[in-house]
Image (cartoon, grey):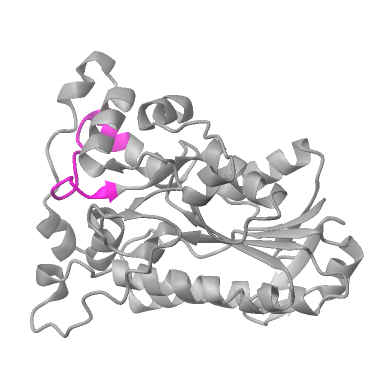
Amino acid sequence: MNVLVSGASGLVGTELCDFLARSGHEVFKLVRKKTAGPNEVRWNIKKNLVDVDALEAAQIDAVIHLAGESIVGLGWSDAKKDKIVKSRTQGTQLLATTLARLEHKPHTFITSSAVGFYGHRGDETLTEMSEPGSALHREPRDRPFFLVDDQWGSRFLSDTCQAWEAAAKSAANAGIRVAHMRTGIVLSKKGGALKAMLVPFKLGVAGPLGSGKQYMSWISLPDLVSAYMHVLNNPDIKGPVNGVAPNPSTNKEFTRTLSKKAFMVPFLGDFANFLPAPGFALKAGPLGEMANGLFLSSTRVKPLVLEETGYRFIHPELPEALEAVL
């Protein structure tokens, strides 16, 4: 297949492009700068521009759309939130409408999404059939959000994910198979959340966040890349796909397991990283809304579609996943 990938230079995109090439597919990359070779296609979200001639010449069979502004940073200012939303919705809509107009349309359009779609849901088990969480707790508040609203931050993520997925509608209307990979925390020491966690965990100065009871839905990088390939090669899969391992863990369990694997003195791993970071301090600090939405919200997600279509996880359990990626 001729496969076009956006976000090809990112953590997931780099591994995915290598995997596609090793599997015998021809890989084309969407780039924002001047193209440097025949397998690059230029696009510009701000100018609403995609090189249609290059797409037609490439005879693209499938598109995997990974590009988007990072949600991690020094908090969520209004400007940062605007970038997060627009980079996802405008980029997805631009690609979807462009693909729908092509003479040679791809048969598949896989977009990245996130388990943030479901919002903060406690210990409720969530599948692709679960409703989004942003409609919960909409009543007005008369005190600061960080004191009383456990949906603060997670509501923004849920609303963003819903708009992100809806932006691909024109591709689906044109008869293109559309799937949305709702990804959890990606485990890789090469980048992402785990790389940022490693230094304090190695030093033994990290710990559970808040109560530690909140669920974290995760997936190893090798499994995520393989899951994208599974969806690409299975024409019956469309709509939402939970890109997570089948065994989510609580934050406390995650902290304990990572301590055993990462602490510089391995046999003392059980005694390291035990001091919790108070949830109130995280919410009231400079990270505020981002901390509550990303670190304190609980999302217990199951990969029902992947399991029911025969995908076999490389790393279904957290200890072996951390062992492999570290």
Residue located 45% across and 69% down the image? 161
Please identify the residue farthest to the right as the structure is shown: 57
What x and y, as percent, mark residue 267?
24, 14
Q: Say above or below: 256 vs 295.
A: above
Residue 81 versus residue 148: which sits nearer the camera? 148
Picture quadrant of residue 89: bottom right
Q: In this view, does 146 lie above or below 308?
A: below
* Residue 32 seen in the figure: no
Outermost residue on the front side: it is 308
In screen coordinates, is 84 left or right of 236?
A: left
Residue 200: quadrant of the picture? top left
The picture places residue 28, in percent across and down from the top left corner, at: 78, 55
Q: Is 141 included in the stretch rendered in magenta?
A: no
Pinpoint residue 134: horizontal percent, then vertical percent. Answer: 32, 73
User: Which residue occupies 65% across, 53% down?
Assistant: 8
Most foreground residue, 289 or 158: 158
SS assignment for the magenta stretch, majority: loop
Q: Kindly tell me whether residue 289 is visible in this rendering.
A: yes
- Determine the residue positioned at 71% across, 54% down: 235
Apparent side of residue 264 relative to residue 11 in the rendered image (left or right): left
> Above or below — where is 167 with respect to 268?
below
Magenta stretch holds residue 210: yes
**Horizontal placement of 194 versus 52: left or right?**
left
Residue at image point 81% right, 59% down: 61
Question: What segment is highlighted magenta in the picture?
Answer: 199-215
